[in-house]
Image (spheres, rainbow, N blue to C red):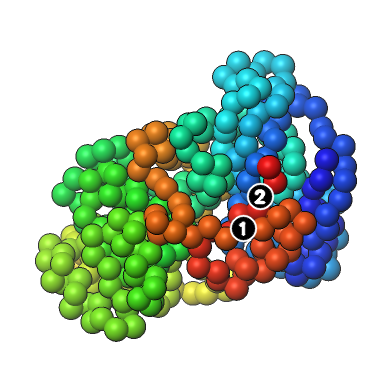
């Protein structure tokens, strides 16, 4: 079977297309024929590593997320069977087998049913972004642990960077759960994408007075901020926050530091919650998978131009170009098509 591997950390050029034998699933494992593999920032950052040229103990197949069809199951697997359409999460986390290959063997609990009406493009887009978005939206001390329709009724959510993948799913999940959603973007083009995703109010931070508009749109304050750039936005976030509100921070540069307005945060009894989907608790991960699956079943999550998250497609042999596109902040969801 065809697979993309890298044997050392470094730029996209370390990615190689190889042919290697498919592995037979062991106890508690399934084998999935990948139709679509998705690229997230975490994928190129893992490939790049902290030191270019560092040799790996084993060749690594990149990419955490994907979707496809089960073609074999191992002993003891009863919840899945060959022919099932599925999406995958954290495929390459602490494992050498990511989704940038034709067949991947993965523990069966990391495989989730994908309804017939949901595209493989949507399934492959869910893992890192949607599960991260769910955890951010449920990080509040007084909020729900699990999203469902009505779970965020009367809540106001601010999603910074609403045209990104996590922002996109944060908007759609929050709207599905009943929240009023405000988002910030950096251009009219991105504003249109956020509107297509379902945001109720869209602010262009390069043109609008964000503080004034937030005070106008949310006079009682923001209950939850889903934050993509805390170092730039923390002062605005704290000013806009409701009493007891939460700022959920899910991304940063490797060596960035956050200067928090301490007194203002204390006055608000604010919670600042850092989010990394890989290391959330088993219960938090289970809740995220359950809620995202329910939202997919309800038709609340979608991708594509009309839904506010354009799809950017590459063939497997051009995986290096796909990684470069994500490194260069391509607007949209970068995917690799295999089947």
* Residue 87, percent from left and from top: 56, 38
Residue 237 appears in view: no
Residue behind mark 2: 337
Q: Is residue 197 left or right of residue 109?
A: left
Q: Is residue 162 above or below residue 85?
A: below
Mark 2 neighbour density, 10 Å: few (under 14) some (14–19) many (20 or more): many
Locate residue 265, reporting x and y percent: 27, 68
Which residue is under mark 1? 313
Identify the residue shown where x is 23% and y is 46%: 178
Residue 100 percent location from the top left of the image: 71, 49
> Badge 1, how many Cα within 10 Å: few under 14, some, many 20+?
some
Picture quadrant of residue 259? bottom left
- Image x and y of residue 250, in percent: 46, 60
Q: Is residue 268 left or right of residue 164?
A: left
Is tag 2's residue or tag 1's residue first in the polypeptide sequence?
1
Can residue 99 be seen in the rendering of this structure?
yes
The relative height of residue 200 versus residue 114 in the rendered view (above or below) is below
User: In what element is the residue under mark 2?
Assistant: strand
Residue drawn at the location 50% of the way across and 36% of the way down: 282
Q: Residue drawn 39% across and 55% down? A: 307
- 117 or 16, nearer to the observer: 117
Report, in whole angstroms, how far the alpha carbon at label 2 lies from the one at label 1. 7 Å
Quadrant containing the C terminus in the rendered view: top right
Q: Quadrant of the N terminus?
A: top right
Asked whether 150 or 144 is in front, the reply is 150
Contact, CB < 8 Å: mark 2 with mark 1? yes
Q: Secondary structure at mark 1?
A: strand
In the rendered structure, the answer to whether residue 73 lies left or right of residue 139 reads right
């Amino acid at each position: 079977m065809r697979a993309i591997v890298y044997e050392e950390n470094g730029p996209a050029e370390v990615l190689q297309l190889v042919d290697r034998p498919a592995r037979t699933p062991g106890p508690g494992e399934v084998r999935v024929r990948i139709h679509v593999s998705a690229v997230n920032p975490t994928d190129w950052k893992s490939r790049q590593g902290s030191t270019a040229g560092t040799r790996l103990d084993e060749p690594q197949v990149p990419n955490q997320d994907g979707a496809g069809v089960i073609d074999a199951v191992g002993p003891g697997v009863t919840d899945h069977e060959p022919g099932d359409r599925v999406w995958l999460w954290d495929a390459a986390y602490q494992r050498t087998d990511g989704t940038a290959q034709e067949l991947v063997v993965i523990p069966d609990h990391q495989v989730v049913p994908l309804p017939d009406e949901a595209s493989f493009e949507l399934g492959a887009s869910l893992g890192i972004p949607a599960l991260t978005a769910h955890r951010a939206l449920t990080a509040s001390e007084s909020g729900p642990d699990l999203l469902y329709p009505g779970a965020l009724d009367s809540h106001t959510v601010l999603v910074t960077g609403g045209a990104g993948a996590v922002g996109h799913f944060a908007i759609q999940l929050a709207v599905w759960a009943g929240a009023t959603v405000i988002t910030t973007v950096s251009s009219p083009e991105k504003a249109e994408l956020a509107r297509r995703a379902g945001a109720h109010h869209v602010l262009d931070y390069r043109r609008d007075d964000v503080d004034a508009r937030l005070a106008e749109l949310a006079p009682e304050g923001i209950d939850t901020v889903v934050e993509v750039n805390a170092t730039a936005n923390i002062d605005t976030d704290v000013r806009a926050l409701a009493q007891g509100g939460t700022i959920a921070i899910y991304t940063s540069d490797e060596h960035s530091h956050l200067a928090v307005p301490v007194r203002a945060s204390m006055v608000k009894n604010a919670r600042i919650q850092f989010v990394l989907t890989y290391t959330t608790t088993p219960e938090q991960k289970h809740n995220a998978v359950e809620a995202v699956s329910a939202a997919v079943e309800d038709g609340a999550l979608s991708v594509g131009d009309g839904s506010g998250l354009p799809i950017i497609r590459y063939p497997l042999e051009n995986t290096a170009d796909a990684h470069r596109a994500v490194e260069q902040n391509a607007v949209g969801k970068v995917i690799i098509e295999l089947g």
